[in-house]
Amino acid sequence: MLKRIASSILNSLGAGLVPRGGLEHIIVGRLQEISALMQDLKNVGAGGATFRFISGFYGSGKTFLLQYVRNQALSQDFIVADADLSPARRLIGSHKEGLATYRELVKNLATKIRPGGEALKAILEKWISKIQQQVLEGKQISPQHPDFKDAVSFKIRKVVSELQELVHGFDFGNVIVAYWEGYMSDNEEKKRAAMQWLRGEFPSKTVARRVLNVNTIIDDESWYDYLKVLARFAIELGYKGVLVFLDEAIHLYNIANSVARNRNYEVLLAMLNDALQGRVEHLGLFVSCVPDVLEDTTRGLFSIQAFRSRLSDNFIASPNLRDLSAPVLKIASLKPEEILTLLQRLTQVHSIIYAASPKLSAEEIKHIAGEITRRGPNQDLTPRDYVRNFLTLLNLKTQNPSKTTSEILGEMTIDVTIPEIPQISNVDESNI
């Protein structure tokens, strides 16, 4: 493992965050969940769709699992996008909160060669270069030939014409053509305008009509439709599909106004129905949440009959007999032996960065884990709690080599993160 990856893992986990890379070196357990999610990727790549709720308590590993799936998807040639929901980023709202989520997704759009996001422009230009190469090889004409640009334009228009059967596919295709025209003529202003439209940044339909000759813009009501168009377009670009990861769905649950909250739930329901009924292709949607978001019959998704009827089958099986193909994937607690394996792997990662990192035996690690459990405020510690305290111990032992592990444990305060439950949102919803 490279030192920079090891450093990223330790820094992120020490802060209670999930590292972007290197997860394959430390992931333990979750074999059934990973297998189910990898099957989802196969289904999406084969032309299907998937929608998953990843349900688990704070610190249980939901975000970790989704980040692992994201990384696997990138390696398998999917386009991926992720966003954390918040009071300012929802699925729909009176202050363009849905559009804000779309913009965040597009900003974080990533591919294997651009895993850090901001990949939209690179995706388009790679595709244009690919079509130019096809024209070079198929037509046997050089870029200097007077027919070259027309031949490329013909192929590009042929591809985008396939999108016209989709809702909003016509204008999406016209904007792609506009980007090509700007690319072909070195018109940076036209390229910039096309990118702004694709990112959901156009202020009005009037401006879009004047600048790009299209009649619509991406807005709060339509952004999900454009994700479906993007998923179809991704296939034409040579990718397997588009995967969207939405974290922190608790922020939808905490919308105070019931009308506003239910409007957001209706968007989720439309996404779920599209996947279950096969109305969308090459698109996967993964939403992580705590159990209350689903199961609370007063303000959660189960307050809506349609969600209860579609998801309640998930709750019939026993905890030891789960239907892993159902829309809700519950994250089970790691077993004690899996926690120990995780801590052993973290010891190895720590030693890559610090030459003086303590060499702990399996028995010592077991003793440390037991002490963290015993001295924590309750018995329901999460993987995050074990990881943060264990890394603190490794750091202290490295910095104080003369002290024994037991001495450091005796002086340590076991830190257990009490999750900050997002407060009920009081954002003005009077325009709903």
Image: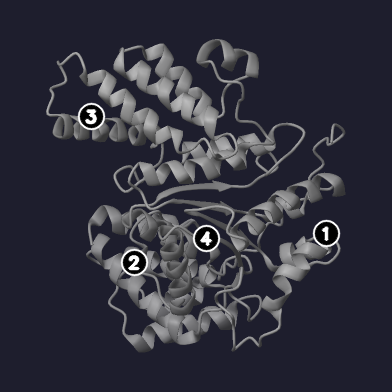
Residue 382 x, y percent position in the rendering: 56, 73
Residue receiving disc 2: 24
CA separation in Å, label 1 and label 3: 53 Å
326 vs 253, left or right, is left
Point out the tag, 3 or 4, that comes first from the N-terminus: 4
Residue 146 can be seen in this image: yes
Q: Which callout, 1 or 4, points to the residue nearer the camera?
A: 1
235 or 120, nearer to the observer: 235
Which residue type carries mark 1? Arg
When the figure is inspected, residue 295 is found, relative to residue 317, above or below; the finding is above
Residue receiving disc 3: 132
Secondary structure state at the residue bearing disc 2 = helix
Q: Characterize the local packing of mark 4: few (<14), some (14-19) or many (20 or more) Cα atoms within 10 angstroms.
A: many
Residue 402 can be seen in this image: no
Q: Quadrant of the N terminus?
A: bottom left
Point out the tag, 1 or 3, that comes first from the N-terminus: 3
Point out the tag, 4 or 2, that comes first from the N-terminus: 2
**Quick check: marks 3 and 2 in contact, CB under 8 Å?**
no
Q: Residue at x 35, y 11 (%)?
A: 187
Toward which corner of the image does residue 34 lie, by quadrant? bottom left
Q: Which callout, 3 or 4, points to the residue nearer the camera?
A: 3
CA separation in Å, label 3 and label 2: 37 Å
Q: Which callout, 1 or 3, points to the residue nearer the camera?
A: 3
Point out the tag, 2 or 1, that comes first from the N-terminus: 2
Residue receiving disc 4: 63
**Quick check: marks 1 and 4 in contact, CB under 8 Å?**
no
Residue receiving disc 1: 299
Q: Which mark is residue 178?
A: none
